[in-house]
Image (tube, helix red, strand yellow):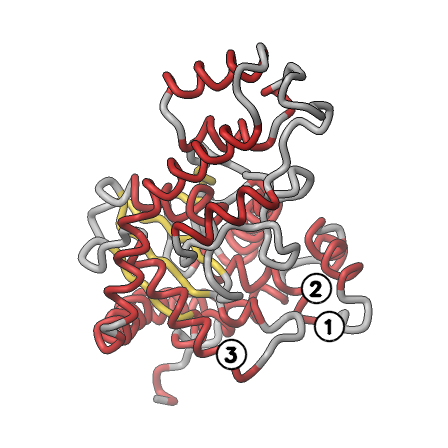
Amino acid sequence: MSKKVMLSGIQPTGSLHIGNYLGALKNWVDILNDYYGFFCIVDYHAITIEYDVSQMQKRIIEAAIEYLACGLDPNKCSIFVQSDVRAHTELAWIFNSIIPVAELERMTQYKDKSRKNAENINAALLTYPSLMAADILLYHPDIVPVGEDQEQHVELTRMIVRKFNNRYGEYFKEPNTYHGKVLRILGLDGQNKMSKSLNNHIALSLTAEETEKLIMQKAMTDTNRKLKTDAGNPDICNVYSYHKIFSSEEEQKEICESCKNASIGCVQCKRMLAKNINDELMPIRENINKYSNDKDYVYDVLKQGAKNASEVAEKTLYEVRNLMGLVDDKRK
């Protein structure tokens, strides 16, 4: 492949939200002219915690629809489901033979998920980074667009590269992380990262009316501002942090000054924000509706994506096994 390559993925845990869009999908779309993309719907990662089996396939197809709706072009990338490419789990097992358990146990995400899922601390939670490393290295990417919470896992992937190359010969290259303009967006509560599990998110699939209602009711502003006549502080206002993403520079300046001199109230500020968010999401929502009504096309994209990904992944897996002395072509 002559073009540089990038690899990334998102779990199918329900409708994507503006945090996923700003922190991941928008970044992917922005650089697709410079990189060929492998974009994975990581269903195997999603089974490390308890989930509703009856909803899994629905969530996978919804994720694919939203990938496409956000602008991922199947002519410039491969969109596929992780479990449809068998090499992911096989390479992960190989990497399990390289990674020290202590390295896995120190992963921040493992500790966090173990606390949240105390009754289901399974082996897959511990070896999650092995599978993520396989997801990445199967495709020899130049960059891995990730959020700041995944930086530690990519660093572990680089360590795996060094250990594998040292033991079996130079083969993998160390991938670089790529961060777009927006690394992390707080949820509507203004306290935590935007997350479906915390119910502090704005789903891409909401209607304009639902979005405005959610912002009016749940978006936190400057908690020190009790009355409209009180001067506000945009620097500690979560709504203003959204304005810095969705509103023009002119609007940002106007809102900042008006908040400080109390010539604008939080209600008006929220309404302006809701309008600007809805303006940006309108074409995405139109595309969600379009692809939701043409699921045959979406399935065709996933099948072709899995075929493209498998061709690259199986070649990598064969070469890895050969380097490890696990291949004897006479047995074929």
Residue assigned mark 2? 126
**Image marks 3 and 1: residues in contact by CB distance under 8 Å:** no
**Chain-order first, disc 3 or disc 1:** 3
Q: Is residue 133 visible?
A: yes
Residue 110 spot, x, y in % from top left: 71, 57
Residue 286: mark in rendering: none
Q: Residue at x 68, y 23 (%)?
A: 227
Quadrant position of the C terminus in the picture: bottom left
Q: Residue at x 22, y 46 (%)?
A: 3
Please tell me whether residue 7 is drawn above or below residue 250 in the rendered image. Answer: below
**Image marks 2 and 3: residues in contact by CB distance under 8 Å:** no
Q: Residue at x 39, y 76 (%)?
A: 84
Task: Answer left or right for 330 relative to 18.
Answer: left
Instruction: Please tell me which residue lies in front, 322 or 31.
Output: 31
Q: CA distance from mark 2 to mark 1?
A: 7 Å
Q: CA distance from mark 3 to mark 1?
A: 21 Å
Residue 193 spot, x, y in % from top left: 62, 44
Instruction: Residue type at mark 3: give it.
Output: Gln
Asked where in the image residue 267 lies, by quadrant, the reply is top right
Q: CA distance from mark 2 to mark 3?
A: 25 Å
Residue assigned mark 3? 55
Task: Answer left or right for 243 relative to 74.
Answer: right
Secondary structure at numbered mark 3: helix
Residue assigned mark 1? 122
Asked where in the image residue 266 lies, by quadrant, the reply is top right
**Image marks 2 and 1: residues in contact by CB distance under 8 Å:** yes
Q: Residue at x 59, y 62 (%)?
A: 130
Instruction: Residue type at mark 1: give it.
Output: Asn
